[in-house]
Image: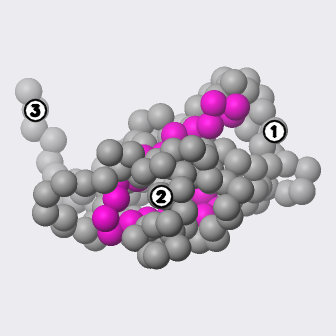
Amino acid sequence: MILTGPEITAAAEDGRLRITPFAPDQVNPNSYNVRLGPTLLTYTTDVLDAHQRNPTAESVIGPDGYVLQPGQLYLGHTLEQVGSDLFVPLLFGRSSVGRLGLFVEITAPIGDIGFHGQWTLMLTPIRPLRVYAGMRIGQIMFFASTGPITPYGGKYQASTGPQPSAYWRDVTGFRAVAS
C-alpha cells in the first residue's frame, strides 16, 4: 500500500516518518518532492575499483548553478533528511528532470526501513545540464510494510552530503577465485 499525500503529511506530523525540513508545498498526491543539496562528488580516477576506496573531488553548486557533463557520474544528495521506522521509502527522479535528460537514482531507488539521513543521488546527464542547489530533483514514495521489521543499521546510516560507494567494506578480506 502506498501512502497518499495527506497520509504522508499526517505521518510526518505524528513522527511515523521524518522529513527535515518538511514543506507542505512539496507534498504530491502520493509522493514528496526532494530537493538537490549543494554538494557534488565526482570520482577522480579513470578506473574505479569495487574492492578499494575510490578517491573523490568535492564541488559546491554556486548561485549560478553547476553544469553536469555527459559521461560523468555525479554523486549529489537530497537537501532533506528522510527516513521511517515503519514505511519503505522509494526515491525516483522527477519526470520534469528526466525530460531534461538527467537520470536520477536509477539503480538503487529503494531505501531501508530505519534509515534516516540525506539520500545520495546518482546523477548522470545525457547532455550538458545546469542544475541548481534547492531544485526539486526527485520524489519519495512510502509503502506500508508487513511482517517483522529489522531496522537498517548499515554503513550509510545518518548520512549527510553525498556518500561515495563503500562497497569495498563489504568485500574486505575477499579474495578473487580464478575460474
Q: CA distance from mark 3 to mark 1?
A: 45 Å
Q: Which residue is mark 1?
A: 130
Hey, what amino acid is under mark 2?
Glu
Q: Are marks 1 and 2 in contact (CB under 8 Å)?
A: no
Quadrant hosting residue 166: bottom left
| Dot 1 or dot 2, earlier in sequence | 2
Given residues 93 and 75, the one toward you in this image is 93
Q: Residue at x 70, y 31 (%)?
A: 96
Asked if residue 14 shows in the view, the reply is: yes
Tell me the quarter of the image containing the C terminus.
top left
x and y percentages locating residue 108 in the rendered image? 40, 42
Is 5 magenta? The answer is: no
When the figure is inspected, residue 46 is found, relative to residue 66, above or below; the finding is: above
x and y percentages locating residue 89 in the rendered image? 40, 53
Q: Residue at x 73, y 38 (%)?
A: 68
Left or right: 18, with 96 as reference point? left
Hey, what amino acid is under mark 1?
Arg
- Label total for image: 3
| Picture disc at residue 178 | 3
In this view, the mark in front (3 or 2): 2
Asked if residue 70 shows in the view, the reply is: no
